[in-house]
Image: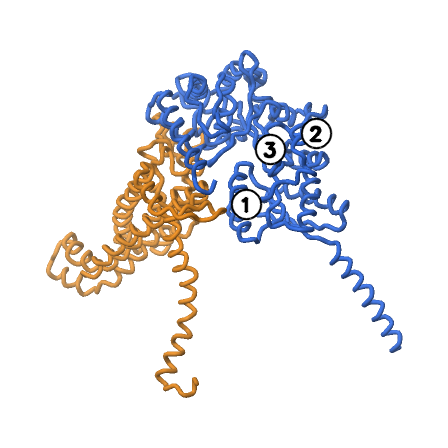
Amino acid sequence: MAFFNVKALAVATATSAAALFSTAAQAVEIEYWQYFFDARVTAMETLIENFQEANPDITVKMTHFPYADYRTKVAAAIPAGEGPDVVQLFYGWLNDYVAAELIQPLPADVFPASQIDAEFFPMVQAMKEGDAYWALPTAVRSLALFYNERLLEEAGVEPPTTLDEMIAAAKAMTKRDGAGNLTQVGMTAGMTAQDHHWWREGLIRQFGGEPYVDDYQTVNYNSDAGLEALNFYASLFTGDDAVSAIGFMDEPQAAFKAGRAGLHIDGSFRIGSLNDTRGLKWGVTELPATADGTRSNYSSYWVNAITTKAEGEKYDAAVKFMQYITSDEAMQVWLDVVGELPAKPSVGLTEENSNDPVFGPFIKGLAYAHTTKFANESGQRQLMVEMIERMTLQGMSAEESLAIAAEAEQKILDEYYNSASN
Amino acid sequence: MYRNLTIRQKQIVWAWAFLAIPILFYGVIRFYPTGNAILISFQEWNLLGDRTWTGLENYQKLFADPVFWKVFKNTFVYLLLGTPISLVISFVIAYHLDKTRFMHGFLRMLYFLPFMTSAVAMAWVWRWFYQPVPVGLFNNALASIGIPQFPFLQSTTWALPSVLAPAIWAGLGFQVIIFMAGLRAIPRSYYEAARIDGVSSWTVLWEITLPLLKPTIVFIVVFSSIGFLRIFDHVFNMTTNNPGGPLNSTKPLVLMIYETAFSAFDMGYAAAQTVVLFLVLLVVSLIQLRLLRDS
């Protein structure tokens, strides 16, 4: 009995030592951070599972936070050395992270810039510096025009494809009560939602302008094209034949969800919540073109980056993980689970994806989309909101209000690009 | 060594041992961050990179910023409208409630209820009340009797009073309770003497009730002033899409600090605004404490 015990003990020790040895030699744990959004977490869990199956010596631990805290927590944790090895960041934050040396460039041998330039949608090049990419997205987002099928049918109009058709359709769907108050809008409006992107990167370019020059460091919309774009946008909610009202039903997306708005411009991330809205029959089409067929769109994305915390074998594991989450396979998973668009035309523009009635219009939009490089997105959006408010609440002319907005935005950009830490 | 101490010395050691915990707590949680915030106000920092020394630049920028002065004015409008209005309303309610026997407890509960309700939930409900047709309760009521729409939150003139109204209502319950406690503390014999002398009830109010309520009034004024100077949650929740709007007409100082720190990530500038708020609160409180000492 005693002999048996000793033998068993010896065997047990040997096996556990072997197990211990093998873990010490091979298993690497890296940490991945993103913000909490149900579908994103599910998609990432699937990706991590697939990745670990292919790389049994690497484990990936995912941590997520509520969106409201995400930016602050990441910003506090990474400089303190407490953060992740691979992190998801909004593209607009990247400059700050590069300047503070908190993330490292992707290795050029695994992520050659020329190959990425060729394979990804062009707006991703905002993440490139010299010959190296700082970060890469799994998925991208763009804008499209949502429509309420029932209201279109009731008014007897087709989903619009040009701006003129859009105005005509919106007019047909606008309803007022006896006192002239809007009870149903033909189209939603409000710079607080996605309209400021539509105005900057969509309308201004469609009217022949260029919103910014010098790599988004100089405001350029105080021009004829900018004014024309502003007048067009303001015509939606001013005058007796307005098809919209700012603040109608509190928020544009709320009005559309409630079935009180015919048309609504929003991002691909809205698809999920519209699908959950009972009784709403909706469709989506590309952002309307001008009469001569000019189209333009806005795209934004979240990128994945390797932090400076990852060193040695953790760095190698992080590179492998980055490779996987920017692969074609990962992008398809992300599209199927989250509904966000693949960052590569080879995945996005497949027959099946680009003809998809829901994703198709967004994916087609990516081909002519631009990505604004923001210094302070909410601050810059606020200026657009105020530009409209000066016109609607204080009766200021479009020219004057546009000039004030351009000057104020230039000030934000100057402060950002001239400050010591950038 | 402890054994050699006198009883008095031992008592001191123990007192300090117990005091050490709150002192340490305040040191780490309050005084260190306060000192640090003052330090950051002379620096430039985006939370990620290194802090760089900029001297008085943040303060110069602050005093040259028209938005800051607008916000500074708003903050005092909240204070100068909110404090007197809530004081008068809560006194009138408390004065009459004190005399009411019918359903006294139930009425008192109704007035206290808003104070216990979450400010966020209340602000959102009021936000929807204020909407134009077809969703807003008030505007629907106006429309149904043929009166034109009132632009509650969509006017640079009316947005601030519209935001302030629910904030006053929310604080009322607390002030009513404090006033009632103050009223109950006035000795009945004064009132009896006044009745024997045949004095009018108006004189009783001016000569007996109000003077004897002075400590209560000073407490409520100090308390609600600090509250209105720090107003944030009602404004932020009623104007989330356009915080402090339209055109900064409802923006208080705390909201500007929040936006500068956590949207623009300009920590130095936000810290400078915080220091200004700190000084404003300090001055207002010192003035009010002086008034308290006079009584």
Residue to which mark 1 is pinned:
A101
Kindly state the secondary structure of the residue where label 1 is placed: loop
Residue to which mark 3 is pinned:
A278
Q: Which chain is home to disc 3?
A: A
Is A90 situated left or right of B146 in this image? right
Which numbered disc flags the more N-terminal residue, 3 or 1?
1
Q: Residues within 10 Å of mark 2 (few under 14, many from 20)?
A: many
Q: Which amino acid lies under the numbered mark 3 shown in the image of this protein?
A: Arg
Q: Which amino acid lies under the numbered mark 2 shown in the image of this protein?
A: Val
Residue to which mark 2 is pinned:
A347
Number of labels in the image equals 3
Q: Are marks 3 and 1 on the same chain?
A: yes
User: What residue appears at the point 41 percent right and 71 percent down from the top-left corner?
Assistant: B20
Q: Position of residue A216 (x, y in %)?
A: 49, 29
C-alpha span from label 3 to label 2: 31 Å
Q: Residue furthest front?
A: A130
Is A55 situated left or right of A94 in this image? right
Q: Which chain is home to disc 1?
A: A
Kindly state the secondary structure of the residue where label 2 is placed: helix
